Image (spheres, rainbow, N blue to C red):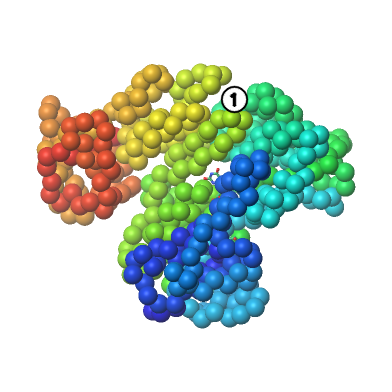
Amino acid sequence: MDRVVVVGAGLAGLRTIEELRARGYRGAITLVGAEKTPPYDRPPLSKKVMTGELSDTSLRADFAKLEADFRAGETATALEDGVLRTDQNSHPFDRLVIATGATPVRLPGEGRQRVLRSIGEALELRALLRPGVKLVIAGAGWIGAELATAAASLGARVTVLDAAATPLAVAVGAEVGAQTAPWYAAAGVELLLNQAVESVQPGGLALAGGGWLAADVVVTAVGVRPAVGWLAGSRVELDRGVAADEGLRTSVPGVYAVGDCASFVSRRYGRRLRFEHWDVALHAPEVAAANLLGGNEIYDPVPYFWSEQFGRMLQYIGHHGDADTMVWRGDPAGPDWAACWLEDRRLVALLTVDRPRDLVQGRRVIAAGATVDVGRLADPGVPIRDVARVLFKPVQRVASRNTQEVCITLAGPMSVWTGLTCGTFGAWHRSTPWPTLWSANGSHSPTLLPASASPSAGSGNCCATAS
Ligand code: FAD
């Protein structure tokens, strides 16, 4: 195997190359990127780039050191057996990684509408955000809220409208999203809810129901779609993105997918998922590169996302569905709070507002699949690490009979595994072949051991997370 082609020169594409080299791959690498710029970071585009604090978000890729052939401004057009076709070349490959990210959805209409995905789009938009300019943002999601924050701080007259009844309705649900609505007015931003757009026209927006909203500048921020159109006609299966298995392999042998474009099978959540998270673009390439080089690793993150809006830091960890129960932690009208989602008393997701410690501790509890004491979880004075049940119990002995069965001997009154219910143990089987082990040294500040740590034998300073 001596030719790897990576398609898409964003964070996920660059990280794939870095991982391949770090893992000792010495063959040829070609990176094909539709944009003319070297890889750069996107999260600052709606934050510090928009406010003018930053103009360059380059990831400072050193292609000479990486010994990679970077083809800037070259767009992949088709994938055939062993050959990538672009608008300029054909690239034969032994292995290929798809990292083409996502493209913003646009609204119908003849009027000029801007989107915010590339550095060029961000810099052009920034130049328009003069004091008094009337900016209308369609979409009160993460990017709409961040752009509104920056534009209002620059003196623009900002209106955000959304077809849903609350901001962030799709991302975190109406009940939690509603708590962010007052932030708009406090920042001097007009928020119009339950208001769908019919089309973008010169000078403004035609609204469903017959209304008209005048605008100097219109930005559409209603979501993105995976950039997979170029794969039409290939043997790569698509399913809400490039369909990948739990090791990020696509339906075509030797072809992998990472980042915003990839929908992968999550063991943790038992279903296919696709995320538009920076953290996924950062870490998924570790697994894709390992497997491309003959490994057999599983990508199974506790997904993480953050957003900076209206002077607040929002962090979301985990994944929840409509059926999960939501519990407030603290007063959502106050300055800092969290929303916690539970599935059968197991903490599965957490949104924190200016509570970074909750986020760090919540990540561990979610990763462990632990059940929690709901009453204590709702009390913001109790550290989240202390609300998990049967969490961090000292383990005397861990032994395995085969790759599916693990016997854990807990210290103290909960000896042997009588404390573990069959259901709990079954959940373990489904989520990961080995339970997550924590090295605790008797303290409450456990460190995560590698997920691959074999519990075939062990004793002493370990704690098992038994939900
Ligand atoms: P991309 O960054 O989209 O890179 C894909 C690359 O592939 C692009 O350069 C594209 O031009 C190229 N490409 C597409 N099609 C082709 C083709 N046919 N041929 C060749 N090249 C092609 N995430 C967070 O977690 N927190 C945040 O606060 C946050 N803020 C964000 C703010 C903004 C404005 C944006 C746009 C995103 C934000 N994100 C945030 C999301 C995060 O940036 C993405 O999840 C991440 O960039 C995904 O990386 P990627 O490499 O998978 O895709």
Left or right: residue 435 compared with residue 140: left
State the residue in front, 310 or 8: 310
State the residue in front, 52 or 180: 52
Q: At which x and y percent is residue 351? A: 49, 32
Left or right: residue 18 compared with residue 434: right
Name the residue at 44% across, 77% down. 28
Q: At which x and y percent is residue 45? A: 62, 47
Name the residue at 51% across, 74% down. 69
State the residue in front, 137 or 427: 137
Q: CB at mark 1 closer than 8 A to ligand 1?
A: no
Q: In this picture, is 8 found above or below 143?
A: below
Where, quadrant-wise, is the N terminus in this rendering? bottom left
How many numbered tags mark residues here? 1
Q: In this picture, is 257 found above or below 111?
A: below
Is residue 253 visible from the viewing direction of this image? no
Q: In this picture, is 286 found above or below 254?
A: above
Left or right: residue 455 compared with residue 235: left
Name the residue at 75% across, 47% down. 127
Q: In this picture, is 145 found above or below 97?
A: above
Where, quadrant-wise, is the C terminus in this rendering? top left
Q: Amino acid at mark 1?
A: Gln
Q: At which x and y percent is residue 366? A: 37, 37
Q: At which x and y percent is residue 315? A: 49, 36
Quadrant containing ligand 1 reads bottom right
Q: Please, what secondary structure does the residue beneath circle 1 have?
A: helix
Q: Which residue is mark 1?
A: 179
Binning the other alpha carbons within 10 Å of mark 1 as few (below 14), some (14 to 19) or many (20 upward) gives some
Is residue 79 visible from the viewing direction of this image? yes
Name the residue at 58% across, 72% down. 71
Left or right: residue 63 compared with residue 382: right
